């Protein structure tokens, strides 16, 4: 999927080695089906019209349905066709991380974290998760702390202005980064992509209406805005 995944396990069990192997296999399988970097993936072939939805892996239909749900939940600010090209990566990456965490939990791990492309799903805790400063490489702008958290950041620091406004097709530039803190990464990550495209005012107003998430927005001038409930997730020392 063009990114790096990592695992931290604090409670290794006799079964955890096999669970990690299955988790890595699961990530590779998701990559084979959904990666837009692979011309032979089902999602790439579907986008080119070489496959019909019925000919794809059954999980393709499930993922596209989840994307439609997120589009409705974000008032149209999420799209699985950014720029007119089929690309459900805004859902798939967070879902892949969540799937890996699910396999570790099934093996008895109650204290682990799985990361993918800078987004984190934790199980148990407590955990401290640094939020990178989008304008100052190597620095943190905040540290999130707690148990059973999903932390997702969308921004321009790593890949430049790559998140498109689905209404105009142009890159969204109203924010330097937008971090959402929730419980399950698939939706938290997809919502973060959509909220980044909204820009600061719409994003914070949208997040404030959703009790499942809190938001931290960094504007292009380095100033920050956040939802009122974010404070309970911030580390104090």
Image (spheres, rainbow, N blue to C red):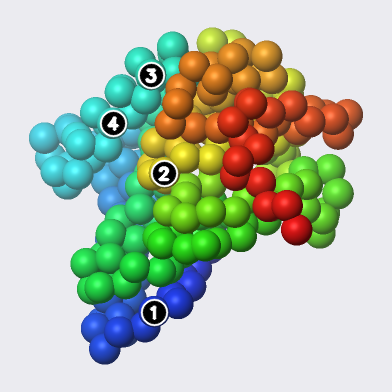
Pointer 3 with pointer 4, Cβ within 8 A: no
Assign a secondary structure to mark 2. Answer: loop
Residue designated by label 4: 66
Q: Residue at x 39, y 36 (%)?
A: 187
Assign a secondary structure to mark 3. Answer: helix
Image quadrant containing the C terminus = bottom right
Q: Residue at x 19, y 44 (%)?
A: 59
* For marks 1 and 2 on the same chain, the one whose residue lies earlier in the sequence: 1
Distance in Å between CA atoms under marks 1 and 2: 20 Å
Pointer 1 with pointer 2, Cβ within 8 A: no
Residue lying at the far bottom in this picture: please name it.
14
Pointer 4: residues within 10 angstroms few (<14), some, or many (20+)? some
Residue designated by label 1: 11
In the rendered image, residue 29, in percent from the top left (x then y), is placed at 28, 61
* For marks 3 and 4 on the same chain, the one whose residue lies earlier in the sequence: 4
Q: Residue at x 20, y 36 (%)?
A: 62
For the residue pair 192 and 148, the one nearer the viewer reads as: 148
Please tell me whether mark 2 or mark 3 is closer to you in this view. Answer: 2
């Amino acid at each position: 999927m063009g990114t790096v995944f990592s695992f931290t396990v604090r409670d290794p069990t006799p079964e955890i080695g096999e669970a990690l192997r299955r988790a890595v296999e699961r990530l590779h399988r998701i990559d084979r089906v959904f990666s837009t970097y692979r011309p032979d993936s089902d999602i790439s072939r579907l986008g080119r019209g070489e496959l019909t939805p019925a000919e794809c892996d059954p999980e393709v239909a499930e993922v596209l349905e989840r994307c439609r749900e997120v589009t409705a939940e974000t008032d149209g600010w999420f799209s699985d066709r950014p720029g007119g090209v089929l690309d459900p990566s805004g859902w798939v990456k967070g879902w892949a991380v969540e799937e890996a965490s699910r396999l570790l939990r099934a093996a008895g791990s109650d204290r682990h974290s799985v990361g993918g492309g800078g987004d984190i799903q934790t199980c148990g805790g407590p955990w401290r998760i640094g939020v990178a400063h989008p304008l100052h490489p190597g620095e943190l702008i905040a540290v999130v702390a707690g148990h059973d958290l999903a932390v997702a950041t969308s921004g321009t620091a790593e890949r430049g202005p790559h998140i498109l406004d689905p209404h105009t097709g142009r890159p969204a530039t109203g924010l330097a980064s937008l971090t959402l803190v929730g419980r399950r990464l698939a939706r938290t990550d997809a919502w973060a992509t959509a909220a980044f495209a909204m820009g600061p005012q719409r994003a914070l107003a949208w997040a404030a209406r959703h009790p499942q998430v809190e938001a931290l927005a960094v504007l292009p001038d380095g100033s920050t805005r956040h939802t009122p409930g974010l404070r309970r997730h911030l580390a104090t020392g």
